[in-house]
Image: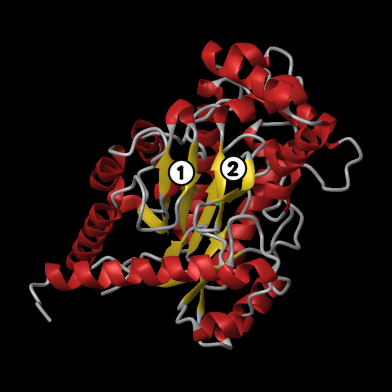
Amino acid sequence: MAFEKTWRWFGSDDAVKLSDLKQMGIEGVVTALHHIPNGEIWPVEEIMKVKTAIENYGMRWSVVESLPVSEGIKTKSPDSERLLCNYKESLRNLGKCGIDTVVYNFMPVLDWVRTDLHFKLPSGGEVMYFDFPTFVAFDAFILGRPGAENDYPPEIVTKARKKYRAMTREEADTLSRNIIVVSQGFIDGVVDDTAADYKKVFLEHIENYRDIDRNKLRMHLAGFLNAVVPVAEKHGINLCIHPDDPPFPVLGLPRIASTGADIEWIINQHGSLSNGIAFCTGSLSVMNNDHLEDIIRSAGHRIHFLHLRNNILLADGCFYESGHIHGDVNMYRVMKLLLEEQQSRIREGRRDTRMPLRADHGVKMLYDFNYGSNPGYPLIGRMRGMAELSGLEMGIEHSMSGENH
Ligand code: DNO
């Protein structure tokens, strides 16, 4: 049985239409109610509109990515009780509509970070790149966050200073806008594109974490899970946390979903299957490639969603995305272990055997340059990734079942 082929679709504004997805062989759509402001309740009628539109094309709304956890919940602000009530209500409404998989993350302020959204590969294709010294240049010298220099290794700060000195004002502005606005806006980022002084607003968000260290953030996540997992379970929903991207602290903010040990800690906070993870090979492999297989072995039973993609890892914590099957992640081994997990679910009679998979991010290529797309989400590059992953999956599945044709 193959994994459910899914595709991240950004709603009716997406240049790719549902009819296109159908042609591409997509079975399940991954989307969110992007028009509902972060922290507000998702009403049944709005959920049903999207669900019906998807089902009219013979596909299913397979995964909600994401039902965003507001900053107020992450920081436990005075408004957090109301936000939590709204979150639970949205989950109930999703459950009533028969949606069974919901992704969230617990990364402070920024969802994911890249310093270059248009890194040119020798082939002419474009991918996203994270350059650690450039990121530190942004934090310490462009944003000027107080104390930032002390939050990073001295040798990286030295390189960052050099990078900053060589930057034009325009380059520095593009870098800031990419990190704070462009890479976040389409996924309900915390800084509004229209904010006049978006860097100031961003710094204020960071400042909200001044008394929140790793332990405290963990306690906030534990509180969140205790509140929402029973609701999810009652309504037949599997929640899954997306790992930190990149999986190490940035901006002096705590990170709690970066390593195998973090994931173990998270799944142990609540024994329900509804307390699960989104297995993102791109995020989890950046510091340590080898632990991907360990994570599948130890936490595989809680994996509810597969984000597969690859990276090339470089010195100094830098990396760039390299499509799907080629790169530092051993996609053959990862796929094989995931298929074994699916087999064991079938043997155990579990209901959640679909294991929705999406080709995460992709190389911008060919006609992708003629159409607008959100950073990381080109049509052709992702479609190539889906095709590669499907072929790999089919080959491994056949060899596992002993078939030789
Ligand atoms: C980036 C995505 C993330 C992910 C969220 C889940 O491309 O993987 O934005 O959707 O972190 O909440």
Residue 143 visible, this angle: no
Please identify the quarter of the rendering in which residue 201 is found.
top right
**Residue at figure coordinates x 63%, y 21% from the top left:** 160
Total marks placed: 2
Q: Position of residue 228 (x, y in %)?
A: 53, 48
Return the mark for residue 192: none
Amino acid beneath label 1: Ser
Please name whichever residue, 297 or 80, is drawn nearer the observer in this view of the structure.
297
Please name whichever residue, 168 or 227, is drawn nearer the observer in this view of the structure.
168
Q: How is the image coloured?
A: secondary structure
Please identify the quarter of the rendering in which residue 368 is found.
bottom right
Describe residue 193's horizontal placement relative to residue 338 as left or right: right
Mark 2 neighbour density, 10 Å: few (under 14) some (14–19) many (20 or more) = some
Q: Which residue is disc 1 drawn over? A: 283
Return the mark for residue 112: 2
Q: Position of residue 331 (x, y in %)?
A: 30, 54
Describe residue 107's horizontal placement relative to residue 11 as left or right: left
Instruction: For the N terminus, give its image quadrant.
Output: bottom left
Q: Is residue 29 above or below residue 107?
A: below
**Residue at figure coordinates x 49%, y 44% from the top left:** 320
Say what secondary structure mark 1 lies in: helix
Q: For disc 1, does the CB lie below 8 Å from ligand 1?
A: yes
Q: For disc 2, does the CB lie below 8 Å from ligand 1?
A: yes
Say what secondary structure mark 2 lies in: loop
**Residue at figure coordinates x 51%, y 87% from the top left:** 58
Q: Are marks 1 and 2 in contact (CB under 8 Å)?
A: yes
Please name whichever residue, 315 or 272, is drawn nearer the observer in this view of the structure.
315
Amino acid beneath label 2: Trp
